[in-house]
Image (cartoon, grey):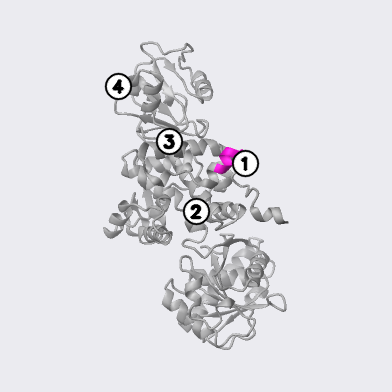
Amino acid sequence: MWAREVAAIRVIGTGVMGRGIAQLAAASGITVELADARPEAVGDAVSHIGAMFDKLAAKGRLDDPAAARSRLRPLDDPFAPATGCDLVVEAVREDLETKRELFAALEKVVGDQTVLATNTSSLSVTAIGTSLNDPSRLAGLHFFNPVPLMRLVEVIAGARTAPWIPDALTDLVRRMGHEPVRAPDTPGFLVNHAGRGLPTEALQILSEGVAEPADIDRIARDVLGLRMGPFELMDLTGLDVSHPVLETVWSGFYGEPRLRPSPITRTRMEAGLLGRKTGEGFYAYADGAKQEPPEPAPPAADARPVWVPGAEAAALTALLDASGATVETGDAPSADAVVLVAEYGGSTLGFARREGLPVERTLGVDPLDGFARRLVVSVHPGVEPDAGRAALAVLAATGRPVTAVRDAPAPVAQRLLASIVNVACGIAGQRLGRPEDVDTAVRLGLGYPRGPLEWGTEVGPDVLRGVLARLHETTGDPRYRPNAWLVERADLGLPLTAPGTAPADLYR
């Protein structure tokens, strides 16, 4: 155990991550020794951090930049004696052997109570610790870039990490003004594991020809409320980074179908279509700016009445009424009416055939967001074109942007959300993270509007179980198996955030 409050740490590596960690620690009152394999890089880092302190002070976000700057101590040698440091944080390149060699050398120069921490984003903490005589002193402390702005820190215990260390690091992270979450030493930890739900399903939707990348991104932003769609996010990160993560997490969980990557990203990565950094990815880029294709204008069409069946018909009917559309109220559509189905899960074609509706005049409209920001229309191959044009025209008259996609076993946004929630339920169900940590990790680390378990509870566990079950039944693909955590809570009427009663609770 640390005998005192942490007073001094050493940060090894003065790249973007090392600089950010050092800035955060020094600003919170901790003395920071800065070291790098290239001594000349240390001075540059100290100057950069000092300039950042001045900017923060000018904005009123740092009281004493001179005092913060004085807590930065440049070192010529990363392996100088570190007996006065409570913690050494490694922020060097993401290579297992490099990190192992670094920690093996550090172990010889640190004090008995010095904790060693790796800022790895993807490597096993346990595997890194195999180079140490005492692996119990090593833990993961995964900051996110840019460190001062990204408040999340994953605290990872390896298989041999001393039990007191995660608690101590959690307290330290809070002292630095960031939010810690306990993450497992498994592929992707929490954030990169939970983050597989969105891109894997988006790529599956693309591979089926349901929608193009720009349309999927617009749906993700407007219907789900995400800051960035999955394809623009992969372009921003770069497929040379994001595709290997997809494969690493999938293979690390021995081919779990819910995490299955796509050959689309492998092929594009090998072709050098990496995204913004190469000027071409799922989008083209001009001077670093994304060139998003324009949305098509609503088609011209003769006005036709509309008939709306389905469990979610009331909200869509109200929207159409407000726009001046003629909405029929009988038990069946007239011979000229366009039928707009608003349902959770299942294909529009399947609903039309099951309910005996006129297939050639029936289209679907996703109700997930309450039709608030974008209307997503499902078009099956049997739709008569004039009826389809009339449907798009009447929906565009509501003032909402309209996106037409191919009919599929469930609407695009429902599939994306169900995948996000199902992967998160898998994490909770395997006890890889507490539900509150899963939600915090995704909300802060990925910028989602809410945590996936909270989100799934809000939409309804039974609703999402139904979406997944229909996808699984229709496609036979095991990626859509509803996770037991989701199924149990849907059956019991519990929120997805609730651990529920465990056997151990009966002995307390």
- Amino acid type, callout 1: Leu
Residue receiving disc 3: 470
Q: Element at badge 3?
A: helix
Tell me: 29 left or right of 433: right
Q: Element at badge 1?
A: loop
- Amino acid type, callout 3: Arg
- Amino acid type, callout 4: Glu
Q: Is residue 357 visible?
A: yes
Tell me, yes or no, whether the two marked residues, 1 and 4, touch with CB atoms within 8 Å: no
Residue receiving disc 4: 384
In the rendered view, tell whether residue 320 sits above or below residue 67. Answer: above
Magenta stretch, main secondary structure, is helix
- Amino acid type, callout 2: Ala
Q: Element at badge 2?
A: helix
Q: Which residues are drawn in magenta?
A: 488-493
Q: What is the distance, in whole Å, between disc 2 and disc 1 at their CAs?
A: 21 Å
- Earlier along the polypeptide chain: callout 1 or callout 4? 4
Q: Whole-percent x and y of residue 224? A: 50, 41
Q: Which disc, if any, is residue 132? A: none
User: In the picture, residue 215 is in which quadrant?
Assistant: top left
Q: Which disc, if any, is residue 194? A: 2
Q: Nearer the viewer, residue 73 or 170?
A: 170
Q: Which disc, if any, is residue 494? A: 1
Neighbor class of circle 3 (other Cα within 10 Å; few <14, some 14-19, many 20+) is many
Tell me: 2 left or right of 46: right
